[in-house]
Image (spheres, coloured by chain):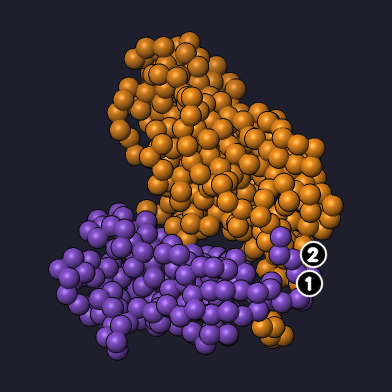
Amino acid sequence: MSTSAAKELVPLRVTVNGEAHELEVEARLLLVELLREKFELTGTHIGCDTSYCGACTVLLNGAPVKSCTVFAVQAHQSNILTVEGLAKGGELHPIQKAFAACHGLQCGYCTPGLLMASLSLLSKNPRPNDREIRKAISGNTCRCTGYQNIFKSIRMAAESMAQGKS
Amino acid sequence: MNIKQEYTVYTTSFRYLRASSLEQAGSVLAELGEDAKALAGGQSLIPLMKLRLSRPTTLVDLNFISGISGIREQAGRLAIGAMARHADIENSAVASKIPILHDCAAGIADVQVRNRGTIGGSLAEADPTGDWLPVLLTLACEVNCVGPAGKRTIPLPDLVKDAFTTDLRAGELLREVAVKAPPAKSGGAYIAFKRCAPVYASASAAVQLEMSDHDTCKEAHIYLGCVGLTPVRASQAELELNGKKISPKSIEAAAEAAMTAAEPASDMRGSSEYKRVLVRALVKRALEAALRRSRGEHVEVSHEYVGR
């Protein structure tokens, strides 16, 4: 068993947006702080910091998780995808394009989390119905939009991803 | 990397042990006593630690132990590894053969929490507002544990002693949840009501009906969640159904009896009067769904909340 005393640093190997990292962190460091403060990936937001709002949602080995409620050391040997990993070669991901086209955001604070939750939904279920969309984003709170344009964005993203065009 | 001092929402410092087996985790936990805690999915523990309501000096991480998260069927039993995530159970074809398990797994919190939270963590925490306990208590269920004194099997009704209190001894950890497949002509359903997806339920009803024919109930099992320090068995409600024809009238009588059995506390999730009325409605709906399922109908129920 690998052990660490309080304040001692724990070795961590983690791949973030395709890039492998090896570092040492304090055990109580949260995954969201690792991403924001160490890797300077500040696209992942901290909203409520209580596991409620979903602004901190990232994909951990493909599954959406609230990164404010996972210790960084638990992501050892894992793959993490954040909002910064969505665009490829300077071109936005179809989900990002759809959120822009449908005005699926107002202040934008919840958007990174919603994009990651949407990506997880559409990769498992390319043609979700409204009920399935509602269930998939029920862990993501938006205080501006009333969700109507977010639904439109996810529907449009599903269309464009199914047609294989961005 | 060190923690920046300006952060306020942070846990106290702790020693971190990445366990490679349950036995090893158990011996460390037994040695360190109450200062140490096991870390399963962390979806209750980490928020509690961030609020500093829980301040363990050592965390023993169970997430890197292999072979304790599988879900398999064997000899009329479903064996669910203690570290199976709620999402694993939600998406398991074998688990979904017992519909009440899917009702529960698919509605706990939200997709992000279901991807982390575990059935073993939920049972060991014994939170009065937890979902798994009332659900599993309607079934023939036992938990297989491992600890410093060896292996032990605990019938589920003996596991929970009080709110947040189980029969587990120092260093004893859940390894597997074993559920006996309900007999033929059975139907069950679980409905929890909550304000919105990520929050705890205000009240919940778990029912399992074993029928002797199309209309006659052989045995009913009814448990209520969130309305007592531990899940409340609605014994009088069961008696309203046992050996009787199930009709809108007997369902109504059972729901009334369940409402009387509930002992809810008033809190931010509703007044005790409100929760009692909620219990009556949830038991009625769960019984109706369970009856239809016992007849082979496909009925979808799960947690209910605004905007679902």
Chain A colour is: purple
Chain B colour is: orange
Label 1 lies in what chain? A
Which residue is disc 2 drawn over?
B57
Residue at 34% in and 67% down: A118
Amino acid marked by disc 1: Ala
Question: Can residue B270 be seen in the rendering of this structure?
Answer: no
Q: Residue furthest left?
A: A163
Q: Does dot 2 land on a helix, a strand or a loop?
A: loop
User: Does the residue at mark 1 contact the one at mark 2 (Cβ under 8 Å)?
Assistant: yes
Q: Decide: is B249 above or below B66.
A: above
Residue at 29% in and 87% down: A89
Q: Does dot 1 land on a helix, a strand or a loop?
A: loop
Please give the count of numbered marks on the rendered protein. 2
The Cα atoms of the two marked residues, 1 and 2, are separated by 7 Å
Which residue is disc 1 drawn over?
A6
Q: Decide: is B205 above or below B246.
A: below
In front: A115, or A143? A115
Residue B280: x and y in percent read 49, 33
> Do tags 1 and 2 sit on the same chain?
no
Which quadrant would the N terminus of chain B be assigned to in this image? bottom right
Mark 1 neighbour density, 10 Å: few (under 14) some (14–19) many (20 or more): some
